[in-house]
Amino acid sequence: MFKNIIFTEMLNNIKKEKNNLNYLETFKKEFFLSKEIIQKHKDFLESIKNIINVKITEKDFMVIYLFAFFDVEKDTDLETISLSLIDNIYNFQEINSEFIGLFNRYQDIYINWKNIDKKETLKKLTELFWEFELIHQLHINNNNDEDVKNFIENKNNKQKSILDLMYSIDKLQYFNSYVPVVFDENIVNNIHKNLKTAFWNLIKEELPSINAIIKLIEEIRIILIELVSNNNIIQNFDDIMDIQHIKTMNELGLTDVNYWFNKCSYLYSLLLELDSENNDEENKIKFNELNNFIKDDKNNMEKSYKCVDYLSYFMDKIILIKNIKLLNI
């Protein structure tokens, strides 16, 4: 029945290349961008409207091949019904009760899936909108006036793009019904401060265990990869903050205060390279506080705590740099 709508050869190729992600991209371009193929599917749907209540578009119908032959969706019902529908279409020469049942079942499952997918998309976009607002609330006071101006401008542009996209999907119905947490600056800052203090105090209490610090180093590396395109910076980080080497040195009892101070010194140099020059003085002051404390007649545990405090400062700064970059994309 459908052989006049789509070439049998193409279907054979799809079956042959099932789950081949490289072929998937080729298929999408050749199939979904073909005006001829789109028109033929449209014609087919028009031809059955006198028998079936068609509730989907031709493009909605065309995605059965993706559901059936490529692992693009974990919904097994969609995969099963798509396979059955394709088999029916290509093996029967006329519309029959089995086809009608399969087609209606596909429409119901697909429309439900599409609505869920749309809602998830709107949910993520709405959360992203308020995430930009939260970034603004948490970090805006850490910048000079010029940076604040640029930060707000970029934030507003990003949020406008998100709103425009959501408007095209549902006229902002989901967004307008979403009730975010009230963004009172004092409340947000206090929560952020209390959580951060508890987190870093826990790291101090765990010393000389460095499991949490190792995880932080891994997180810093991930942020670095997102921030820089210079492989030399990443390679230098891997050499100096070599996790396996740090673990070995710690097991041997060789990670004393001077060892960690040297790591902090490297992080300070890295911060100077990544952060705005406008913040150089602030970064210098913070590192000098650590440097002077290490030189003072303090016990080693207090000095270790001070190194953890500097690591906390570095994490705040590099996350801020990352967030600013996100707004500038």
Image (cartoon, rainbow, N blue to C red):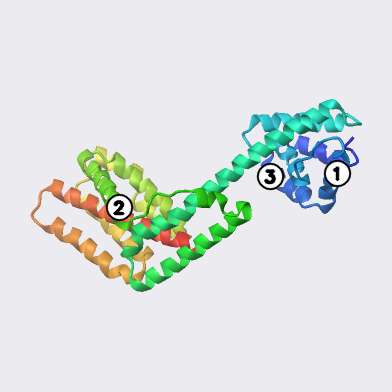
Tell me where residue 199 sits by quadrant: top left
User: Which residue corresponds to the image point at 22% horizontal and 66% vertical from the top-left?
Assistant: 285
Q: Is residue 327 left or right of residue 302?
A: right
> Mark 3 or mark 1, which has the lower sequence index?
3
Q: Nearer the viewer, residue 239 or 66?
A: 66
* Residue topped by disc 2: 187
Give how far apart the Cα atoms at labels 3 and 1 are: 33 Å
User: Which residue corresponds to the image point at 69% horizontal and 37% vertical from the top-left?
Assistant: 110
Q: Which mark is residue 325?
A: none
User: Which residue corresponds to the image point at 77% horizontal and 52% vertical from the top-left?
Assistant: 33
Please tell me whether mark 2 sits on a helix, a strand or a loop. Answer: helix
In the rendered structure, which amino acid carries the disc numbered 2?
Answer: Ile
* Residue topped by disc 1: 46
Mark nearer the viewer, 2 or 3: 2
Q: Nearer the viewer, residue 53 or 130?
A: 53
Tell me where residue 280 sits by quadrant: bottom left
